[in-house]
Image (cartoon, helix red, strand yellow):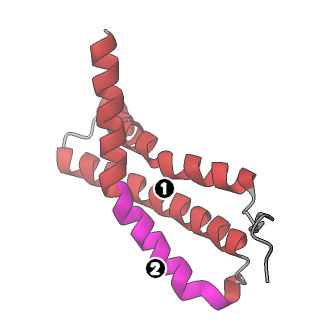
Amino acid sequence: MNDPITPIQHNSGNKAITILRIFLWLMPASFIPAAIFLALLMYNIIRIQDEEILIGFSVIVAVCATACVGYFDQRLALMQKKIDPPHSKKELARWTVIFVIAQIIIAPSICYIAAYGYCSIM
């Protein structure tokens, strides 16, 4: 039985991995401006006149980069939970897809907040 005065010590996760995971969740917000910049760069340098190709290429690059970040984030999450990676392949794939879907909402919101803040300062 625990003494009511003695605090219970929980096994906390690695703080460095937690901070890295926070930055990984915020990172896809930079992929949206980078994809727009890449599309504009391709439009000016390569002179591709078809906008659908540029938009499609930019979306594919942004989604693939977000999926890679999501995969890395979930590998770190499994490392924090001390789950052996070969036993968690389905969980890894499922949470990577959830990460990408969540970033569809989170990343534009962060970009909008940053743009609104910049415009209000100027």
Q: Which residues are magenta?
A: 87-103
Residue 17: x and y in percent read 70, 56
Residue lying at 70% horizontally and 81% vertically, measured from the top left:
83
Residue 122: x and y in percent read 31, 9
Residue lying at 34% horizontally and 36% vertically, measured from the top left:
111
Which quadrant of the view contains residue 45? top left
Residue underneath mark 2: 94
Residue lying at 73% horizontally and 63% vertically, measured from the top left:
12
Question: Regarding mark 2 in the picture, which secondary structure is present there?
Answer: helix
* Residue 96 visible (yes or no): yes
Instruction: Return the residue nearer the eye: 9 or 80.
Output: 9
Instruction: Give me the C-alpha separation between circle 2 and circle 1.
Output: 17 Å
Name the amino acid, label 2.
Arg
Q: Earlier in the sequence, mark 2 or mark 1?
A: 1
Mainly helix, strand or loop, the magenta region? Answer: helix
Apparent side of residue 49 relative to residue 101 in the rendered image (left or right): left
Apparent side of residue 61 relative to residue 75 in the rendered image (left or right): left
Mark 1 Cα-neighbour bin, 10 Å: few <14, some 14–19, many ≥20:
some
Residue lying at 76% horizontally and 68% vertically, measured from the top left:
8
Q: Report how many numbered discs are placed on residues in the image.
A: 2
Which numbered tag is attached to residue 81? none
Residue underneath mark 1: 65
Instruction: Return the residue nearer the eye: 9 or 21.
Output: 9
Apparent side of residue 2 relative to residue 119 in the rendered image (left or right): right
Residue 113: x and y in percent read 32, 33
Question: Regarding mark 1 in the picture, which secondary structure is present there?
Answer: helix
Name the amino acid, label 1.
Ala
Mark 2 Cα-neighbour bin, 10 Å: few <14, some 14–19, many ≥20:
few
